[in-house]
Amino acid sequence: MMIPKRFAILRPYLASLIFSPFARPPLKEVIAWLRQARCEKRALKFIESRQTAGDFIELQLKGFHDVFYYPSAGNWLELCAFINEILNEKHWHNYTSGPTPILPSDVVVDCGAAEGLFTFLATPIAKKVFAIEPMSIWQPGLIKMFSEKSNVELILTAVSHSRNELYMSDFGGSSKVASEGKNLIQATTIDDLFFAKGIPISFLKADIEGFEFQMLLGAVKTIKAYRPKIAMAVYHVENYVPQIVSFLRSLHCDYRIKTKGIAPNGNPILLQAF
């Protein structure tokens, strides 16, 4: 019998009992993680209806008035994973649980909007949402869902430490910056997008496949000026979490930091600064 992938966290969790540079998750959370149902079964709890129409899978999600559109050429199980991460408040990857909720007064930046589910969640709540996504596979769905939303602005580029060009791999929700490839993407900085324009952001979400620290390097002025809540994925092997914590506290010494979960590489799943 094949061992579920989620059991890969056992080795780093046991190692964390000897030494860990950050707070390890409570044992009861680890047990709950290991005992959870399969990904698709968990996602179906949030779905009222599903149908395929042309280029999109149309989902009616529980608690939402609008239809969510996902590329029909996309991976269904990957979408199920997204739904669990974004909508399940107990999931270690959930951005809005605990100290970083979305508030009606928030100006939200969604770095790595991808399929758009976090923006979809934020749009009915937040004052303004900026959805940043460079990959062409996701852009038609984002345009279909949000182009007529008065409080959503789509930014179809990448974010980095400087204005430059980046190659990106094309692996759906796992697309990432690469040394070469067919996808040459224009990149800018959070500071150019927001600080330079006097836009006071209050919630910065990021999941950009190990490029999170480079994004933060291009957001120094914005973070210093506006001190946004931050919820970002840090499970990628490229992320050195103590460095990120130190960097954020160098910008605001009063930032409180919380990490959630543990990944197979030993990193936390999510970091929240508030």
Image (spheres, grey):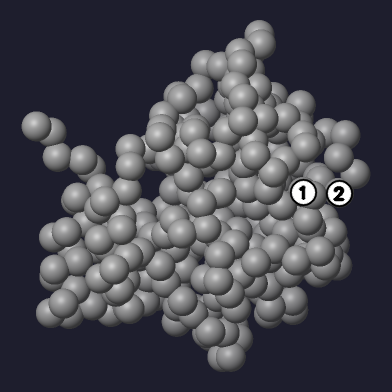
In the rendered view, tell whether residue 72 sits above or below residue 170: above
Is 140 left, or right, of 38 in this rendering? right
Measuring 31% from the left and 58% from the top, which residue is drawn there?
Answer: 32
Q: Which residue is mark 2?
A: 151
Measuring 88% from the left and 34% from the top, which residue is drawn there?
Answer: 148
Q: Are marks 2 and 1 in contact (CB under 8 Å)?
A: yes
Q: Nearer the viewer, mark 2 or mark 1?
A: 1
What x and y, as percent, mark residue 40?
A: 41, 32
What x and y, as percent, mark residue 274?
A: 60, 78
Q: Which element carries disc 2, helix, strand or loop?
A: loop
Outermost residue, bottom side:
253
Q: Would you say residue 171 is visible in this rendering?
A: no
In the rendered view, tell whether residue 81 sits above or below residue 215: above
What x and y, as percent, mark residue 78?
A: 44, 32
Q: Which mark is residue 123?
A: 1
What x and y, as percent, mark residue 8?
A: 19, 51
Measuring 56% from the left and 56% from the top, which residue is drawn there?
Answer: 206
> Could you tell me the amino acid type at mark 2?
Asn
Is 199 left, or right, of 63 in this rendering? right
Q: Which element carries disc 1, helix, strand or loop?
A: loop
Q: Nearer the viewer, residue 86 or 137?
A: 86
* Residue 53 found in image quarter: top right
